[in-house]
Amino acid sequence: MASFPTLPVEILHHIICHLDPISLIALSQTSAWLRGIIHPIRHDFNCRLLALELLPEHGGIVPLFRGRDNQLTPSWDSDEWRGNKYACCGCMKLLPHMMFDNHAILRAPYRKPPPGSIEAQRAGMTDWEPLQPSIRWKHIQSRTDHDREEQRIRRAAVSDRYRELVAPAGQPFARVSHDRAVAAEEEAERYLCGASRHRRRCLECKYQRGDWSKPGAQLGNKEAPIVVSRQRDFLRGWERYFTSLLVPLPPDRGPRTWKVYGVVSTGSPWTLYAARCPCCSSWHELSAFRQWPDAAEYRSRPEPPTSPLLCNDCHLKTHKSPTLLTRELSAGLLSMLRADQANYFRTLGYGWSTINRYFIHLNRSSLNRAGDFGPPHGILELAKCKSVGEEILGGLKWANILKDRIVYDVSNLPDLRRRLHRFRDFMNTELDEPTLAGVMDNNWFMFWVEDYELVEENYHWLQDVIDSIEGRPNLVLQHVQRRDPYMYHISGPASASR
Ligand SMILES: [Zn+2]
Ligand SMILES: [Zn+2]
């Protein structure tokens, strides 16, 4: 198509003004004549890229983030995040979300704007005008200044509304309504959300710009920056470092654990970190550098590396020894698995001193003494208690005279399980309701009694896994080379997709 000979240019201008940013660039690329009329500038290419990131087939989902309680929908762990991409207006690419730090995609001005927001409406139509590029640029600048002022006013309105929430003087416990403040915040979100997306930069563009050289900006060093990234839920530490390598036991086969904030049975959040390999200049999740923490420090923030970081790929290219890499990888995994297994083994020995104390109380008939430790009521015969207590505890090896822990090894596990079953039978068949409630009025002990077999099952399962890793260490290398797309596929500048 050389031209639109039958169409007056004024009408053509009018049509072009109503295109969306993606069609504007597409039309400008159909012929030299149209390119000469449209004359796209960098701003138009930015708008096209920012419109593309809102299309599900190019950018994936538009997550919703509520700033006042940090609620993200859908969560980082959902499948929808796997293919989610964001625009970088530095290198002009749509990149996987892992190529951006948290601020670059979660702060209100940099988020993808949800439907109904001002920015989402703008992304649907070009702001192209039939003007000389220099004059257009001045228009864009003055519109940007106007938008900035509008955003400042909106933010100030939200602050004012929240200031009104302070209780009146002399009435510190007066009820105040959050409704107006929340309404102002939601209204401001409509204007702020995504309004500065054109300033969003990926990890690599920020590196090239020197952002990661500023003090406190990241956790690594100048040569190998380490940047805080997403959070995902994992049940075990080794899952965070070797995601999807092992098929874990299903959640209902995991024993419950009691934390300060409640029962944990489905995992807890672990922070991921993105680090730049100084050798290949690519960004990877920190796991790709074999920087394993000690088992006791699983959750600590990474320290600046003392030796140069070398990603798994560069390790292979530098040392040319798959055997060496395999050894390092499997040693890291095995030490985590063994630490986990040792934890289960210790757990199997926890409850015996508590059972011993219950039977001391039962045998002395001292059940109702104020402040005493033990069940609140007792209707059992002393002789019966003594014989059952002997059946459950007799012959156990105690570590000291206080009998606060037992001494046992793997060969004792079947015997311990038999004793535990006897204790459970005793509770269920021979204790009255109030006494049983008193015995189990302790969360960790209740979980220990009820989930004992699950703990033992996990202990044996981990032993099987350890045996299989020791027998086939290449499994770990093959897994790392396959690269889990979510954990490891953080594209560097050379392989970033458009
Ligand atoms: Zn970039
Ligand atoms: Zn590398």
Image (cartoon, rainbow, N blue to C red):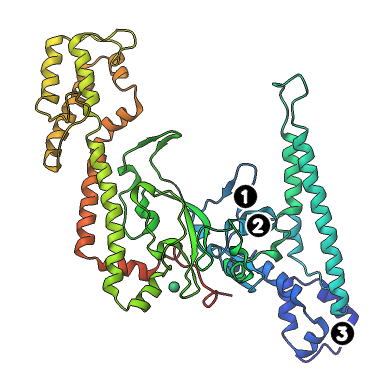
- Residue sitting at x 9%, y 27%: 395
Q: Which mark is residue 65?
A: 1
The type of residue carrying mark 2 is Arg
What is the x, y in percent for residue 195?
73, 59
What's the CA distance linking mark 3 and mark 2?
Answer: 40 Å
Q: Position of residue 73 (x, y in %)?
A: 57, 50
Q: Specify few, some or many for label 1: CA neighbours under 10 Å numbering under 14, 14-19, or 20 or more.
A: many
Count of picture labels: 3
Q: Earlier in the sequence, mark 3 or mark 2?
A: 3
Amino acid carrying label 1: it is: Phe
Task: Decide: is 302 above or below 444.
Answer: below
Residue behind label 3 places its C-beta within 8 angstroms of ligand 1: no
Q: Give the mark, 3 or 1, whose residue is nearer the N terminus.
A: 3
Residue nearest the viewer, comparing 129 with 206: 206
Label annotation for residue 393: none
**Along the viewing direction, whichever of 12 and 288 lies nearer the viewer:** 288
Residue on which disc 3 sits: 7
Q: Examine the image and state in which quarter residue 113 appears.
A: bottom right
Residue for badge 2: 111
Res 243 seen here: no
